[in-house]
Structures are given as C-alpha cells and as structure tokens.
Amino acid sequence: EVQLVQSGAEVKKPGESLKIACKGSGYSFASYWIGWVRQMPGKGLEWMGIIYPGDSETRYSPSFQGQVTISADKSINTAYLQWGSLKASDTAMYYCAKRGIAAADSFDYWGQGTLVTVSS
Amino acid sequence: QSVLTQPPSASGTPGQRVTISCSGSSSNIGSNYVFWYQQLPGTAPKLLIYRNNQRPSGVPERFSGSKSGTSASLAISGLRSEDEADYYCAAWDDSLSGPVFGGGTKLTVL
C-alpha cells in the first residue's frame, strides 16, 4: 500500500528556518516524482515544486523559486521542504504528493499534510 | 488566479446528478491527463479520478470523469450528503513543467 507520511505540525517565529519531511513507503520511492503543494487557510491548492529522488532533479513553480528548497534522500525514502527565513505569510498547510508514472500524469497519492504556523 | 478554471460553487439535492467543469489550455488539459481530487473538511485531498476517467479502487461508480479538448468535467450521480466537499481538477502543464490546479469547487448538498 502506497503511503506518504509527513512530519508533525510546526509553530515558528518570523525569520526562523524550518525543514519538513515526507516519508514514502509501499512503492519504489526513487522512481517517482514527488511534489509539494501549499494550501493557505481557506484557499485552494498551489504547486510549489517537484523532485525526482532517483537523481534529485528538481523543478520549482515560478511563484516559489528562491523562496523554498526541495530535496530528497532516497536512502531513507524521504523528501524535504525547507525555508531559510520564514514569514508570517508562509502560514499554511503543506502537502507532499507522489506523481503517477506516466509523463502526462499529475499527483495520485497525497500525504496527510503538515501545518506550519508562523507567528511572533 | 488559478490556471485551470472551475466554478467556485455547485449544489444539488440528494439523489440528483451534478457536474463540475474544468477549463484549461493546450499546454495542460489539451495534452495531458486530467485528475480530480475530493477534499473533505479538515482532510488532505484524495484522488477521485485519474487519467481523465479512471476511478481508483474504492471510489464509487457514482463518480465519473470526462475530457474533451481543453475542458474536462466531473459528474456525481445519486448525490449523497457525504459528497459535500471541495473538488479540484489538475493537469500537468508542459509549459510550466509542473502540475496546475483549478481553484476548487465547493459542493453543497441541500
């Protein structure tokens, strides 16, 4: 059974750094793209970026380029999303999601989400 | 402003059939598969339809998807109260090299 399990909720202050995790199981983690999606309170889904764990090729949405860093460690089947300096506007739910195998596929499986709250 | 266009709301009474539309362009829906997700309040999105019209195991036959050109739609027949949720369409975008989403449709069961 495919599962994506994310790290727990975080409460941070503006200016602090943060790295959240997403551990995949039940499939060949290195062989599927895994992405990150932001959902701000009461809003829709926004794609942030995506990584291929097999060779760490990474692509970012123009809206998030330079704002976050996506990485992966295929030896422990885990992808990461990190911020160097958080802002209050980063407060949101963050989901990781696995992409299907076809080039024309979008995300099929989703993690449970990690709530990030940034407040002074 | 989302890349894919969905109506912000839809509604129906129990037992009715409702459809939700999703409009895109040649770089996304026109050349890639459409996926649909259901997001119940306080939960993560769940895959409802993949590759335009395929249902994952466990998704009732009441849910169906279709695609024509640069548009797609999700149909829900025999509407039930538990279908009340937000529904999102998505498609890979070749120009962006990433997925694009619709803004979401809030379905209310009256």
Image (spheres, rainbow, N blue to C red):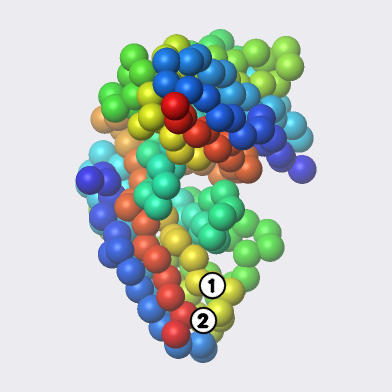
| Residue A93 numbered mark, or none | none
Confirm or deny contact between disc 1 and disc 2 (CB under 8 A). yes
Which residue is the site of mark 1? B83
Binning the other alpha carbons within 10 Å of mark 2 as few (below 14), some (14 to 19) or many (20 upward) gives: many
Indicate the quadrant where residue A92 lies: top left
Identified at 35% across, 73% down, the residue is B10
- Give left or right: position of A26 versus B45: right
The amino acid type, in three-letter code, at marker 1 is Asp
Identified at 56% across, 18% down, the residue is A19
Vertically, is A41 above or below A75?
Answer: below
* Residue B59 at x, y percent in the picture: 63, 64
Indicate the quadrant where residue A84 lies: top left
Q: Which quadrant is the C terminus of chain B positioned in?
A: bottom left
Residue B17 visible (yes or no): no
Which residue is the site of mark 2? B79
Identified at 68% across, 63% down, the residue is B58
Identified at 54% across, 60% down, the residue is B41
Vertically, is B102 above or below B65?
Answer: above
Residue at the far front: name it.
A120
> Could you say which is closer to the camera, residue B45 or residue A56?
B45
The amino acid type, in three-letter code, at marker 2 is Leu
> Could you say which is closer to the camera, residue A22 or residue A91?
A91
Residue A80 visible (yes or no): yes
* Residue B21 at x, y percent in the picture: 32, 65
Please tell me whether mark 1 sits on a helix, a strand or a loop: helix
Please tell me whether mark 2 sits on a helix, a strand or a loop: loop
Vertically, is B84 above or below A101?
Answer: below
Vertically, is A14 above or below B74?
Answer: above
Q: Chain of mark 1?
A: B
Q: CA distance from mark 1 to mark 2?
A: 7 Å
Q: Chain of mark 2?
A: B
